Amino acid sequence: MTTIGLIGSGHIGTAIARRAIEQGHDVVLSNSRGPETLSDLVAELGPRARAATASEAGEAGDLVVVTVPFKAYLDVPVEPLAGKVVIDTNNYYFERDGHYAELDEGRTSVSEMLAAHLPTSKVVKAFNAIQAAHIVTEGRPAGAENRRALAIAGDDADAKAVVTDLIESFGFDVVDAGPLAEGKRFDRDKPAYGAELDADGLREALAAG
């Protein structure tokens, strides 16, 4: 099975870690405060989890999840993530992150900015438009009626296939929104953001975005 490195261990990171462990993966968690602050979470998650620095989590991960507040994206280590598939869960909340003119003016997107910071990584946007708790509780078997779908976006087909496999194993269908730039279709305040829809409904919401 895969080792998943998590840079950030807030609500989304913890939910992804919990679901990944349920699927037989190992997880390496990190945050901005140091591995020792994650001891209770690691104990709760069990023997498949351990804590590390962000660089160590990036180095250990076969797949890496960046799930930090957007304003901290430049703190994500670059070299340990070289050549790796990186899932970006970030959302831009100007109330928390401050204003970024390039985002406010629509000249780029959150995930494109992370990808520019990680030029040797393969960034795929995912998990940003679902409540963290739902990652753990809302998964359904393949083919189940009204199985919820999640959107992804990215520029590398192989990387998107890796992320699709992970999301489907978590119990969700996947709708590919297209290149990384199209990830803005399921950003905050878009019809697809937070929408609890099946694949057809999500495609409609993305088209409306």
Image (cartoon, rainbow, N blue to C red):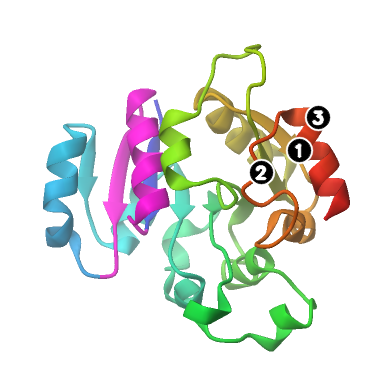
Question: Which stretch did the figure color magenta?
Answer: 8-32
Specify few, some or many for label 3: CA neighbours under 10 Å numbering under 14, 14-19, or 20 or more: few
> Disc 1 versus disc 2: distance between alpha carbons?
8 Å
User: How far apart are the alpha carbons under marks 3 and 1?
Assistant: 5 Å
Q: Quadrant of residue 130?
A: top right
Q: Which mark is residue 195?
A: 2
Residue sitting at x 62%, y 12%:
144
Reading the image, the residue beneath label 1 is 202
The residue that appears at 75% across and 73% down in the rendered structure is 108
Examine the rendered structure and indicate whether residue 74 appears above or below residue 51.
Answer: below
As drawn, 185 above or below 61: below
Question: On the image, numbered disc 3 is attached to which residue?
Answer: 200
Query: Residue 103, image x and y in percent?
Result: 70, 78
Q: Which amino acid type is marked by label 3?
A: Asp
Rendered location of residue 111, percent (x, y): 64, 63
Rendered position, 50 above or below 198: below
**Residues under numbered marks 3 and 1 in contact, where contact means CB atoms less than 8 Å apart:** yes
Q: Secondary structure at mark 3?
A: helix
In front: 25, or 83? 25
Of residue 142 and residue 66, the one placed in the foreground of this image is 142
Around disc 2, counting alpha carbons within 10 Å, would you say few (fewer than 14), some (14 to 19), or many (20 or more)? some
Specify the quadrant of the image occupied by residue 23.
top left
Measure the alpha-carbon separation of dots 2 and 3: 12 Å
Q: Nearer the viewer, residue 125 or 189?
A: 189
68 on left or right of 46:
right
